[in-house]
Image: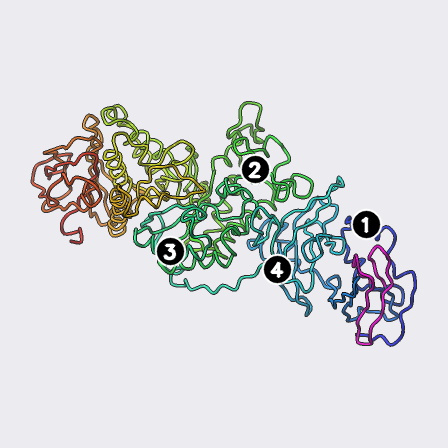
Amino acid sequence: MTVLQTAPIPLPEARPAPDDTARLLSGRHHDPHAVLGAHPVGDGTAVRVLRPGAVGVDLLTAGGAVPLTGGPDGLFTVLLPAVGPPGYRLRVRYPGGVETVQEDGYRVAPTLGELDLHLIAEGRHEQLWRVLGSHLREVEGIAGVSFAVWAPNAAGVRLVGDFNHWDGTGHPMRSLGSSGIWELFVPALQAGTVYKYEIRSRHGDVRQKADPLARAAQCPPDTASLVTASTHTWNDRDWMERRTRAPHHRAPMSVYELHLASWRPDLTTYRQIADVLPGYLTALGFTHVEFMPVMEHPFGGSWGYQVSGFYAPTARLGTPDDFRHLVDTLHQAGIGVIVDWVPAHFPKDDFALARFDGEPLYEPADPLRAEHPDWGTLEFDYGRTEVRNFLVANAVYWCEEFHVDGLRVDAVASMLYLDYSRGPGAWTPNGHGGNQNWDAVRFLQEMNATVHRRCPGVVTIAEESTAWDGVTRPADSGGLGFDLKWNMGWMHDSLRYLSKEPVHRKYHHNDITFSMVYAYSENYVLPISHDEVVHGKQSLVSKMPGDWWQQRANHRAYLGFMWAHPGKQLLFMGQEFAQGAEWDHEQGPQWWLLDEGWPAAADHRGVQQLVGDLNAVYRTTPALWEQDTTPDGFRWLDASDADANVLSFVRYAADGTPLVAICNFSPVVRHGHRVGLPGAGGWRTVLDTDAPRYGGAGAAGTALHTAGPSPWHGLTHSTELTLPPLATLWLQPKEHDGA
């Protein structure tokens, strides 16, 4: 380093060219680092500093303080006689005697390397959040925060925030060439800094945008991004190793879906929820919990399905580390965590992704492809390399940074079809004239392949409401690559059947049995989700006909049928205790129905007890999950007894151990009902939804049965049962029931 020994030379060459100055001050300069900082000029070194509002700036070097010359535009300059970048700091003086000593961020190299830029250009930066967004760093010995944002169409980008009074004049960012990335390192900033990007479009308009890669955001209605860094220490190593041991389709999976903000309205933070939720799920025996979207969103009434901050857990309930604590606590309790992920669309809010750099960027330029007709949102441009990278990396981000065990991908059908919810003339066909969105197909395949490669044990689940072929087929075999798919057909058909008065159910018997025609076309989850208990659809128990006793009995019988049917189970909060009202995201579940003082509390606690017992038997009975995806695991006993509203079937474990399920969906006690059994000897009723402990009448009587040599239902042995009204029975061979 050359030490300054003489006074500076006040030459005009210290000032940048007028065009550079004009573009710098107007926020239109693509490379402010070529102007600001230290640069050789002739036989000397010019140092230029942009500090709007300052009354003076001194250069602090090993040789002493050197004053810079400045004007009202805030640009201060000096020409030093020595060649080479001097080591220096800045002493900046502001009106009122305020004085600060600062490092100069414009004298450091870019914080993104050539490999990062290459991977971004290729769309293969699988940890994109590590280079874009804001990060606490030490660069060339200087502590501060780096910022990087993709805005390829911008004429200029400046950083604004509380640290510069939301005036970006002094913080222009540099463009890193054809990558479209703009970058800046700002010394001395710390975690908690509030910021946005001030983006000037090619058309001259200026917008302040939240950081698409921000890992924390202000709590709505505020919309700025926050600098953050994690200090969480994970304590879930055993869980993370254990979750990789068995394929999901051959393991028990019983999912409790909830909306974090309303599950318990009295619990207002992630950490408060972490104190209560694991114990509740453990008591009820659920293997997994599924959170409706936790990503930041501007409108609470969207329930998180209109995401503005894809990399930021919502600040409504705390910090990112608070959310990590919740996941960690659930893992330590043996509960897997699935999060809803929404790569199908995003809101039009001006502060977020829409027309991010003044042009369609994250959304397609074609308005017939950009606008989502159902939700008033914008769809992603899956054909754009950087957009696809943004989303694939986001899926990886939630798995790696927050240890989530699954991604349930929302609204997959709306991604797959170009004419989804669009009439003739309102959509643009693909290059072959069809309605398939092949860009979305390739994106989903890449996302699933990348997540499964990088994050062993993570399950991906598609909410896909059509008959698209191969949703759960591996991507390398032409499928989309998901592990599981929501069985919307089963849900709609079975609920339609149960909503009928029993006297009419015989005319709709096919609704309750048809799912087995296609049960092995995909790997399925049976979802009774939030979508089925809102917007006038009624709660699950309220869909049932009859008086209160019959509604509860129907509800219990249906749950017994659901848990025995091939596929994994998903139940939305409130349905586990037969809440009578629709879900209200502002009020949450009707927990008071379980209070001792409520006249019908025992009725609701009975249903809750049933759910706990269903899960307890389910988890210890491989017949109910080990062969969910193969016909070897299922056999109808009687699927055609429509007049009696009765159906019966067998589930088999891989070793042949059976469980028999009999459902009586009529309000009549069926005495002497004969059912074939796959084996002689003693059989025990391991679950009876009509049991008094659940609020039933106990009409079945004995729980022990003997299979005699009377052929029935194509089997060599059978027994006679008393079928309770509106009830489901599960039977197991006595030697296998654990009793």
Determine the CA span between mark 4 and mark 3.
33 Å
313 or 551: nearer the eye? Answer: 551
Determine the CA span between mark 1 and mark 4.
27 Å
Determine the CA span between mark 4 and mark 2.
29 Å
Which residue is labeled 2 in the image? 379
Q: Is residue 587 magenta?
A: no
Going from the N terminus, do you reach mark 4 or mark 3 first?
A: 4
Which residue is labeled 4 in the image? 135
Foreground mark, 4 or 2?
4
Judging from the image, what secondary structure is the residue with disc 2 in?
strand
Q: Name which residue type carries label 4.
A: His
Determine the CA span between mark 3 and mark 2.
37 Å
Residue in view at x 42 percent, y 59 percent: 328
Magenta residues (range)? 48-77
Residue in view at x 16 percent, y 30 percent: 668
Q: Position of residue 664 (x, y in %)?
A: 20, 34
- Number of other residues with Cα within 10 Å of mark 4, as a class: few under 14, some 14 to 19, many 20 or more: many
Q: Residue furthest front?
A: 597
Determine the CA span between mark 1 and mark 3.
56 Å
Q: Going by the image, does 209 lie left or right of 502?
A: right
Q: Name which residue type carries label 3.
A: Val
Mark 1 and 3 residues: CB-CB less than 8 Å, in contact? Answer: no
Question: Does residue 300 sit above or below 322 in this rendering?
Answer: above
Label for residue 276?
3
Q: Name which residue type carries label 2.
A: Glu
Which residue is labeled 1 in the image? 23
Mark 4 and 2 residues: CB-CB less than 8 Å, in contact? Answer: no
